Image (spheres, helix red, strand yellow):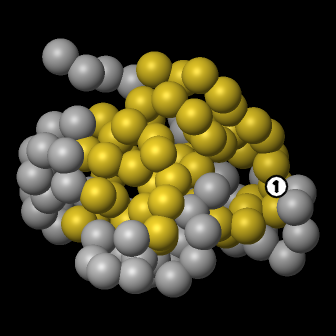
């Protein structure tokens, strides 16, 4: 029922290799992004379209419903944060989240996530 719906997407420079449909955080400055390494930093958005190499310009979904590759099982409406590989997992207390799962899934599934950044 729910699929990807881009509302706001921004361009940024990849500070390291970025895999498609993974979660991103700010890099060394406001123009750079890098893969999230857990839920300890504000998650900026979702990498769209393609894998990027260091220095490539990439598109980041920052508002809307985006597709995220999972690093573990999640249920519908679970809050989603990043694992060590920038994949989506169910958030724990004190994690930053990118938003909420719009579909249940397991490791390596790609699911729609409604972006609603927060710290829980």
Is 20 on the left-hand or right-hand side of 58? Answer: left
Residue sitting at 47 percent across and 45 percent down?
116
Q: Is residue 112 above or below residue 14?
A: above
Residue sitting at 13 percent across and 44 percent down?
76
Residue sitting at 19 percent across and 46 percent down?
77
Residue sitting at 40 percent across and 82 percent down?
94
Q: Secondary structure at mark 1?
A: strand
Q: Is residue 8 above or below residue 111?
A: above
In the image shown, does 49 or 96 lie closer to the viewer?
A: 96
Where does the N terminus fall, quadrant-wise?
A: top left
Quadrant in which residue 59 is drawn? top right
In the image shown, does 120 or 13 lie closer to the viewer?
A: 120
Residue 44 position in % (x across, y down): 63, 56
Q: Is residue 114 above or below residue 4?
A: below
Asked whether the viewer can see residue 108, the reply is no
Quadrant in which residue 66 is drawn? top left
Quadrant in which residue 73 is drawn? bottom left
Residue, disc 1: 13
In the image shown, does 103 or 119 lie closer to the viewer?
A: 119
């Amino acid at each position: 029922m729910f699929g990807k719906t881009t509302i706001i997407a921004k361009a940024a420079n990849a500070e390291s290799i970025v895999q498609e449909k993974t979660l991103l955080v700010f890099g060394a400055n406001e123009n750079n992004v890098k893969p999230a390494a857990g839920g300890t930093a504000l998650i900026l958005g979702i990498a769209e379209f393609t894998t990027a190499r260091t220095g490539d310009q990439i598109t980041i979904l920052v508002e809307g419903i985006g597709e995220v590759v999972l690093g573990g099982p999640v249920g519908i409406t679970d809050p989603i944060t990043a694992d060590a590989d920038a994949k989506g997992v169910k958030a724990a207390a004190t994690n930053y989240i990118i938003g909420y799962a719009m579909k249940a899934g397991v490791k390596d599934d790609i699911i729609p996530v409604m972006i609603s950044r927060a710290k829980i």
